[in-house]
Amino acid sequence: MRNGLIAAGLAGLVAAAVVSAAVAKPAAQAAPAQIAACTNVSIGFLGPLTGPAGFLGQEQLSWLRFGVQKYNKANGTTFKVALGDTQLKAPVARTQARRFVSDSNVLAVVGGSESQAVVVSGNLFEKADLASISGSATQTNLTNGQFRTFFRVVPNDSIQGPQVVTYVAKNLKAKNVVVIDSQDDYSLPLASAITRGLRARGVTVSRESVSADDTDFSSVVANVDSNVNVVVFATQVASAANTLSNQLREQGKKAIVFGTDGAYSPSQFKPRIGYVSVFAPDPHFDPNARALIREYNRYSKNKEFGAFGPATYMAGLVAMTAIKNACADGQVTRAEVTRQTRRTNIRSIFGGRLRFSAKGDPLPTKFVIYKISNGKYSPVG
Amino acid sequence: MDWDKLVQLLVNGVTLGSVYALVALGFSMVYGILKLLNLAHGDVLMVGAFVGWGVLGWLGGAQDPTVAVWLVIVLMILAAMVGGGLLGVAIERFAYRPLRRAPRIAPLISALGVSFFLQNSVLLLFGANFRSYDSFDLVDVGVGVDWGPFHIWVMRIVVVVSALAMMAGLWLLVTRSKLGKAMRATAFDREAAAMMGIDVDRVIVKTFFIGSALAGAAGVLVGLVFFQINHFMGFNYGLKGFTAAVVGGIGSIPGAMVGGLFIGLAEAFSVGYIEDFTRGRLGSAFSDLVVFLILVVFMLLRPQGIFGKPEVKKV
């Protein structure tokens, strides 16, 4: 009886995972090419609203909603946002993507926020001719032509990897580096690229790996030798980078943490000394963005934001502009919206104009590197 | 042999194991009395962590506390224990008691529901942002015990000593008090205990209160030593605590303590040495594999756990 109950308990825990993965009703993989009216249009948001990166998705959603209400007011449109919480889990992201595909009111998707969500949803959206525009998915392969309806407003990791390598090897003059990944589609290729790049420059590199929902890194830190200068952490959870940094200090290790873009969060990652690279400049440092920030602060209760929200605001702007252009005759298809998205040429809140390459990458952009001193961020590269 | 690393991993393992042991105790106590796996137990830990965080903010925050630091920590733990305990009582009253005579799968499903309810309630109340205890502001990282080349931060000592004190207190309560005797009688045979005049419902409520109070305290200890808390942290600690309870022998209080330390040490040492032992084939990411492999091995070879007794069935 006891063993039976324990087995039932284990089954229950498995059921918990299954239940959490099945929050949305399953839908057919339809490819609706039907013409829709422009009066009841939704923009899907595919990102982590709960789970370890929930703070990131909430920031993105808040900025997307802000952008939608601002756009509706200025253009007389009635766009709505449909939510698809990925929980930072690829199977959940696929379920949510199916839901968007089957909802004929969804004419474009903002997201997936995380690369693994794009990996599992890209084919579904492509079959449905549904444009998806990400404000944060940076994995290089996403725009190698495999997902023809995928676009992103941020540069990819083929830019981030070499930039991080150059900064760590040249500017920080690191000789011994530990690179940590968090076992997902975003972090593994990026960590591998950084490892290869650093080794090619003669830097001694060792690799560690953690889980995305780990909260204690003290035993990983025990593996960091005292002669290590920099720990590069390819993570999507900024607070994890903060804990890692604290635990390095706790164990008397001199190494500083260099976080990749997922770690960018002035409210969550506040080391005494550290670095972080991010795909878009934080508007807080841009005097031209002050009016936008004021407007956002009036709109949102959550005034803590970094680069993720504004980039998703841009992605939403791309989607709404494309739908509005496609709706010029009062009717619209998803394919038309995708075509219009490809032709995007709008003013970017990060300066200049935003256009896409044939493969869906923004033209041209680079990552920004910030130095963090006692929790204060300042751009350095 | 790298002794620095070995000692550091030992410290990490004991800290983590102390937290797992507190969680495992709650699982074991409730299982012992009701033969129920309280799968929402990890979420009680999470709520306790948020109660502690609220008290910390109420007392001026980590940077500028209005009372002495030791008092801040004590008040945080006490508040989390009371909050966790009351939550445990509410869970028992509304989610489990109505199902006491239902098939065993029913309370298990109810427990899952409670778990999701608690996670999402905290998400709604506090948002998805991680909350920080800012423990380095509360107690500087330099404060601690220096032993040769080792420095052990005082917060780790606080966590281990608090956990051991609570375990010792529980042990005394169960073995020396009237309530403990009633708990043991109820665990042994609920119907017979009722016939002997024991108010079984009251014993169950008190058991839930104590087990959940320990989980609440564990939540604060997690926040103090690992800095960050969030609305879904309970799942992992619940899972590891449950594993510890099974390995130690579910229903056994010493088993929960030993199981917790065993799992904590196994996790720490597997992170530290798995790469060396497998000659680089497996990395530190596989530490959970080791932990749950231990669970599988115990289920196969000694399903009653280290301290559990095999169940004898009358045929």
Image: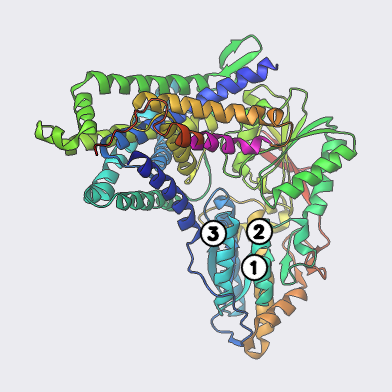
Query: What chain letter is assigned to the residue under label 3?
Result: A
- Residue furthest front in the image: B315
Mark 1 or 3, nearer chain start: 3
SS at circle 2:
helix
Mark 1 near mark 3, Cβ–Cβ under 8 Å?
Answer: no
Mark 2 or 3, nearer chain start: 3
Foreground tag (2 vs 3): 2
Query: What chain letter is assigned to the residue under label 1?
Result: A
Q: Callout 3, which amino acid?
A: Arg
Instruction: Measure the C-alpha gap from mark 2 to mark 3.
Output: 15 Å
Q: Is residue A366 above or below residue A361?
A: above
**How far from the left and from the top, in percent, is residue A51?**
53, 50
Q: Is residue B254 above or below residue B299?
A: above
Reply yes or no: does residue A378 show up in magenta.
Answer: no
The residue that label 2 is drawn on is A310
Span highlighted in magenta in the image? B283-296
Closest to the observer, B66 or B211: B211
Q: Quadrant of the N terminus of chain A?
A: top left
Q: Residue at x 48, y 32 (%)?
A: B222
Q: Callout 1, which amino acid?
A: Gly
